[in-house]
Image (tube, rainbow, N blue to C red):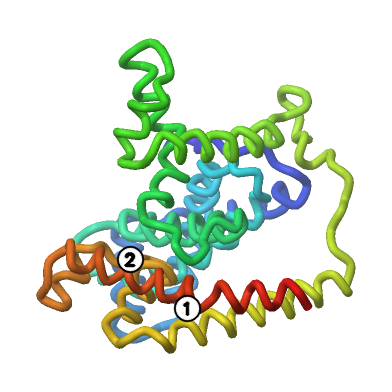
Amino acid sequence: MSTMALPVVTDSMSRYLAEIKRFPILTADEEQRLALKFYEEKDLEAAQALITANLRFVVKIAGEYRSYGLKMLDLIQEGNIGLMMAVRKFNPHKGFRLISYAVWWIRAYIQNYIISAWSLLKIGTTQAQRKLFFKLNQAKSAIKNLTGAEDLHATALSLDVKDSEVAEMGERLRGDYSLDTAIVDGEGLTFLESLADDRQNQEEKLADFQEQALLQSQIAGAMVRLNDKERFVIEQRVTADTPMTLQEIADHFAISRERVRQIEEGALKKMRNALTPLIAEAGTV
């Protein structure tokens, strides 16, 4: 098997990589035997062996998201949670390798963490905006390769969003990407890591925790105003770790995709109307 290209590492990363390299990669037969043992007998040692054998693949996938300016170890930790979920739900009788299934769980957990860290997952965030967040650079490169130049409007059309959304997201991504650039080629230190430590003190952390708790309480109160169908759509489209598609929800209720979209739009409007006065009131305290 060819050696994987690993991202630039810090001392903590070096230690972690050294640790996970101790676990051998499983052959297809070994993996099948362990997967069956966990699937049929709930053997936790088998599950542990499946997880540790695939930790290096999580590192490789997490490395694809370095440009968002977040710590690699945090990305890896989220990816590892996705890997554990994949092992838990993996059905070895389907006939494919674990990593082919796990990659979707790993990416989902990493992407949800990135969105949360960037404070982009707010009430009203659409599936198109999430797609834009992760696909913008890829779309811009594809269009530049075809036309020889960047084209904001063509990029927006390809991602089914507004020109202004592409411009705004481009500014967001450009800012953090530059911070992740290495100060000296071949060295591990980036501009992001050279910034002064401005982490919150305990009082600030407590205040933020209380603010988040209040917001969660307000959102829960706003959810109460929704009917059962609206609540299901919001939970599955906005807050779920792996959101359902419009078609999946449409099939669930035996209605059209357009009707699901209308329900989602109406539910988000209800929640915004419920949250706006509460947030305004909290801001005056």
Query: Which image quadrant for residue 229?
Result: bottom left
Q: Nearer the viewer, mark 2 or mark 1?
A: 2
Point out the image quarter for the C terminus: bottom right
Q: Is residue 135 above or below residue 201?
A: above
Q: CA distance from mark 2 to mark 1?
A: 46 Å
Residue 260 spot, x, y in % from top left? 22, 68
Task: Using the image, tell me which numbered label, if any, was put on residue 45.
Answer: 1
> Residue 204's quadrant in the figure?
bottom right
* Label 2 residue SS: helix
In this rendering, the answer to whether 113 lies above or below 252 is above
For label 1, the crowd category at 10 Å Cα-Cα, with few meaning under 14, some 14 to 19 and many 20 or more, is: few
Left or right: residue 174 versus residue 273 is right
Q: Which mark is residue 234?
A: none
Mark nearer the N terminus (2 vs 1): 1
Would residue 139 be found to the left or right of residue 14 on screen? left
Q: Amino acid at mark 2?
A: Glu
Residue drawn at (41%, 34%) of the image: 163
Helix, strand or loop under label 1: helix
15 in relation to 30, above or below: above
For label 2, the residue is: 265
Name the foreground residue: 260 vs 175: 260
> At which x and y percent is residue 108?
43, 59
Q: Decide if residue 284 is on the left or right side of residue 143.
A: right
